[in-house]
Image (cartoon, coloured by chain):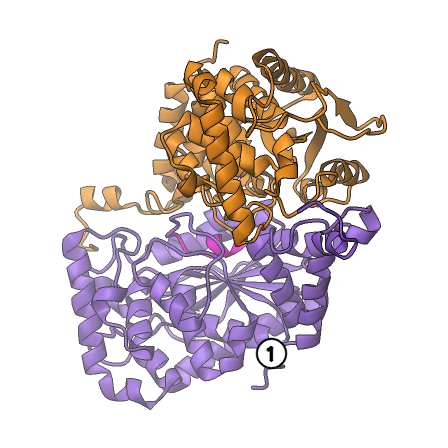
Chain colours: A purple, B orange
Amino acid sequence: MTIPPIDENARQQARQRQGRLTKPAGSLGRLEQLSIDLAGMTGQLSPPLGHRVVFTLAADHGVATEGVSAYPREVTAQMVLNFLAGGAAINVLARLFGARVVVADLGVDSDLPSHPQLRSLRVRRGTASITQGPAMSVEEALEAIDHGRQLVLDEIEHGLDVALTGDMGIGNTTASAALICALTQLDPKDVVGRGTGVDDAGLERKRDAVRKALLVNAERIEVGPVEALAAVGGLEIAGLAGVIIEAATQRRPVLIDGFISAAAALTAARMAPAATGYMIASHRSQELGHAAALRELGLKPLFDLDLRLGEGTGAVLALPLLDAAVRTLNDMATFDEAGVSDRETDAAHNRPHN
Amino acid sequence: MTIPPIDENARQQARQRQGRLTKPAGSLGRLEQLSIDLAGMTGQLSPPLGHRVVFTLAADHGVATEGVSAYPREVTAQMVLNFLAGGAAINVLARLFGARVVVADLGVDSDLPSHPQLRSLRVRRGTASITQGPAMSVEEALEAIDHGRQLVLDEIEHGLDVALTGDMGIGNTTASAALICALTQLDPKDVVGRGTGVDDAGLERKRDAVRKALLVNAERIEVGPVEALAAVGGLEIAGLAGVIIEAATQRRPVLIDGFISAAAALTAARMAPAATGYMIASHRSQELGHAAALRELGLKPLFDLDLRLGEGTGAVLALPLLDAAVRTLNDMATFDEAGVSDRETDAAHNRPHN
C-alpha cells in the first residue's frame, strides 16, 4: 500500500492564513491546528466535507461466552437490525450531522436477513475464543482488511470526503484490549476496562481472558501486526484497519471513534505508519485503555464526554468541529480586509498602545 | 427577580427514558446528563433549540491603556464593525450552527455608525480605570444589567430557545479577573492570565492592576455583587449578567462562553443563585482563571479546545452537543421497540449469557 505524504505546502499556507485572520494568533486553539491538519491531508485549504460516511462494522467474538460482557452475544445481531431500522444512537447522530451510515457484517454469528442497507461481508461466523488459540487465520484477517478497504473504495464512487470508524460486537472491548497489549508493551491491568459495564468480577474475568489470550498466542503475536490481529483481534477490528488504511491511501481524513477503533487504528499504524497522518482522534472514551492507545498513536482526542458506546458515535460528534475548523480558516476576514489593528502593525507604526 | 425552579419531574422522566434506550446505561456520558438538564430547565423532554441567539456585547475599559492587553483599545470598535460585516469568528460559527448574533454596544469608547444590526445601548464611553477607583457607578451597572435583560426580552418576541453569551472589549480579561477575585476568595495570581496574549511583563502589569483595583475598591466590593461589578467589572460584563438572569427567568438554557462570560455568570449567580440552574458551561478556555471560576459556579465545561477568543465562539461550538443530547433522548429506539436484549431482561429469564 502506498499512502501519499502529507502536503506540507498546504499546511504552511493554512498556518499563514490563520495568522492573518481577525483574532489573536492561536486563539481558536485546537480548531486552528485541525484546519492545518486537514489542509495537509487533503492538499486543500477548503476541503469538501459534505460526503461523510460512518463505517459501522459488526462481528461476533468467541470470547463473549466467557463472562467478559454485560450483554448476551445475540445483541450484536439485534443491534445490526437496530442500525438498519435507524433506531440506534449512531443513526440519530448521523442524521443530525449529515453523515451516511454504512453497516457491514464482517462476521456476525447469527442469521441476518438480506437488507438493502446491509453489506454482507461475513468472513466467518464470529471468531474463535482468543483464550484458546487464534481468533482467526491470517488469511481471514487479510480478507476482512480487504473488505474494509473495498468499502471505502465503493463509497469513493458515491463521494467520500471524510471517513468515520464505528463498531458493534459483543465482547469486542476484550479483543481490542488484547490487541492493544499485543501491539504495545502495555500491561492488561492498564488496558482492560469495563466495556459496556461489567461489574468487578466481570472485569477480573476480562483481565484473565486477556492475559490468557496473550500467553496462548504469544508466538503468533511476535510475527507482526496482521498476525497479532488474527491471533487476538476481531473481524470488525480487521475491517476497520482496512477502512483506515484505504482512507489514508485515498487522502481522506479518517475520524477515529473510541476504544475498538483505536485498536484498529493502532493495527493500521503498525501495518502502514504513514496512515497516522490521516487520523483524527475524535474523543477519549471512559474505557480504561483508550487514552494509552491514543498516546501510542501520538493522537490527542478533540473532546472527552465520558462516552463508551462505540458504533461511531464519538466520531460523528466531532464532525461539527471539522466544519468549524475549515469554515473559520476560509470565511473569516483578515486584519487587512476588516481594517482591524493587529499587534505587529501597531508595533511597526510605533503606536504607544501596548 | 423570580427565577422558576428546575422541573424535577421532567428531569426524572428524561432520566428514566435514558435507561430504556438501546445502549448500555450511561454510555452516552455527558450527553445523557445534558438531555436531563435541558429537560429540567425547559420542562420538556424535546425542547425546541432552533432559535439560538448569541448576545455579543461590547464595551471599553479604562484599564486598557495601562499595558494590560496585547491589542490597542480601538480594536474594540474595529471588531464591532467586523461583527456587523460578518467577518469575525463568531459570525462564521453562528452561520455554521444556525445561530443569530445580536451585537450590542454597552459602552464602546469610539464613535460607531448606526447600523441595522447594532443595538446601541451605550451606558457610557468605556469604564474608568479600576486601578484608580470604581469602573462605573452602581446606577450605571444596574442600567447595563437592565439593557442585557431587555435584549433577551426583545429576542423572546422573535423566538428564543437558547441564549448564548459573548463579549468584545479590549482589557476585559483584566476586569473579569478582578471581578472574579472580588466575588470569591481567589488570589489574583491564580486568576489573572494572558488574555489575548500578553508577554511576561504584560502579565505582571495585569496582576499589579488587579491587585491595585481590589485594594482601591475594597470597601465597595464588600457591599455586594452589583457593587463589586460596578467597582471592578465592565459594562459588557454587566450586560451579560443581565442576559443570563433574564434567560433563567424565562426558563431558557444559557450557554456560557469563556472567561469574561464566567465573570458575568458568577455575578449573576451571586445576584440570583437560582440562575445557575439554567447555565451550561460550554468550554474551558486557556485563560488561567477560567477553570477556577467555573468551579465556583459548580459548572463542568463540556469541552476544552484551548480556545481564548471570546465573542461567544466557545458557546456556539457547544450547540451541536445540545442538539445531539436532545435528539438521542427523543429519537433513539427503546429496548422494547427494537427487540434488543438488555441486561435486566436476560437476568430475569435466567439466561447463561453473563
Determine whether, in the image, residue B112 is placed left or right of residue B275.
right
**Which residue occupies 44% across, 17% down?**
B219
Image coords of residue A148 (percent x, y): 51, 73
Q: Chain of mark 1?
A: A
- Quick one: label 1, few (<14), some, or many (20+) residues within 10 Å? some
- Residue A238 in the image: above or below residue B23: below
Camera-side residue of B181 and B45: B181
Q: Amino acid at mark 1?
A: Thr
Q: Is residue B108 above or below residue A259?
A: above
Is A314 inside the magenta-drawn segment?
yes
Q: Nearer the viewer, residue B316 or A210?
A: B316
Front-most of residues A146 and A211: A211
Label total for image: 1
Image side of residue B254 versus residue B7, left or right: right
Q: Is residue A14 above or below residue B212?
A: below
Q: Quadrant of residue A8?
A: bottom right
Q: Position of residue B109 (x, y in %)?
A: 74, 29
Q: Is residue B177 visible?
A: no
Quadrant in the picture for the N terminus of chain A: bottom right
For mark 1, give the secondary structure. Answer: helix
In this rendering, would B65 be left or right of B184?
right
Q: Is residue A33 visible?
A: yes
Residue stretch rendered in magenta on the structure:
A309-316
Instruction: Name the residue located 78 percent from the left edge and 30 percent from the top edge.
Output: B110
Looking at the image, which residue is at 83% across and 51% down?
A: A337
Residue in the foreground of this view, choosing between A44 and A138: A44
Query: Horizontal and vertical percent for residue A50?
Result: 68, 56
Residue where numbered disc 1 is placed: A249
Residue at left 52%, top 53%?
Answer: B200
